[in-house]
Amino acid sequence: MKAVTVPAFLRIFYPSLLWQMPPGNQTLYFTFDDGPHPQITPKVLEILDKYQAKATFFCVGENVQRFPQTYAEILQRGHRTGNHSMNHLNGWKTNLNLYYENVNECRNHIDSELFRPPYGRITPTQIHTLKKEYKIVMWSVLSYDFDPETTPEQCLDYVLEHAEDGAVIVFHDSEKSAQNMLYALPKALEYYNEKGFRFESL
C-alpha cells in the first residue's frame, strides 16, 4: 500500500518541517519537484494559468543551469520556487558536508529560503543544520505521478481522496511523471475549483 499521506508520528517527531499549511482558508498548495523541464514545465504553467492557480516549483540546480529560460518563465508567471539541491541528492546516502554544500551551490541559481529534500530523504543532522538557513518543506499528499505502477486514474484518485484544506500536494514536472501528472493535474484543479478552493504558492 502506498503512503500517499504522511503518518502523524512523523509530523510530531519533526515539527520544524513544513508538512501542510493551516486550514481555514479553503486553499490548496500544489508543488512540483525536479524541474524545470523545457517541454513539460510550460505545459504545467498553461494548466495553472487556466485555473488562476499559483504553485511552488522545487527545482534542481543543474536543471536551472540547463534551462534558464524555462526557470525564468516560472517566476514571470508569478509562481514561487524552492531549492531541491544542485544534483537531486539522496540525503540518506550523502554525508552532511557534501549535502550542505550541494544545497548551498543550488542557492547560487535559485534565490529561495524554501528547501525540499529530494525523495523526502533527509537525516536529523541534515535537518538540524539546514533549518538554520531554510524552511524545509515536505508534503501532506503525494500523488505518486512518478511511479510506473501507478495509472493516471490512480494518481488523480490519490489526490482527490486525500487533499483537504491546507494540503501541500506533490507532483513532478519531469519526463518520468509527465503522463500521470498531465492527466491528473487539470482534473484535480477543476474538481477543487468547482468546490470553491483557491490555489496558492507557499
Image: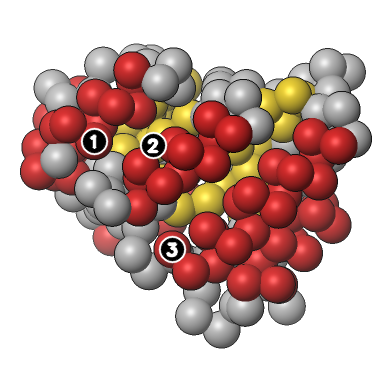
Horizontal side, residue 72 vs residue 116: left or right: left
Horizontal side, residue 15 vs residue 24: left or right: left
Q: How is the image coloured?
A: secondary structure
Which of 19 and 154 lies nearest the eye of the viewer? 154
Mark 1 highlights which residue?
70
Task: Looking at the image, tell me whether mark 1 or mark 3 is earlier in sequence order.
Answer: 1
Looking at the picture, how far across and down is residue 134, in whole percent?
Answer: 39, 20
Q: Residue at x 60, y 77 (%)?
A: 150
Q: Residue at x 65, y 37 (%)?
A: 168
Q: Amino acid at mark 1?
A: Thr
Q: Amino acid at mark 3?
A: Ala
Q: Label 3's element?
A: helix
Mark 3 highlights which residue?
178
**CA–CA distance between discs 1 and 3?**
16 Å
Q: Amino acid at mark 2?
A: Phe
Q: Label 2's element?
A: strand
Indicate whether 56 appears above or below 159.
above
Inspect this view and state whether residue 51 appears: yes
Looking at the picture, how far across and down is residue 128, in whole percent?
Answer: 41, 28
- Quarter of the rendering containing residue 161: bottom right
Q: Label 1's element?
A: helix
Mark 2 highlights which residue?
58
Which of 9 and 153 lies nearest the eye of the viewer? 153
Indicate whether 123 appears above or below 193.
below
- Quarter of the rendering containing residue 174: bottom left
Looking at the picture, how far across and down is residue 101, in whole percent?
Answer: 14, 33
* Location of the C terminus (image quadrant): top right
Q: Residue at x 36, y 45 (%)?
A: 41
* Location of the N terminus (image quadrant): bottom right
- Quarter of the rendering containing residue 129: top left
Q: Are marks 1 and 2 in contact (CB under 8 Å)?
A: no
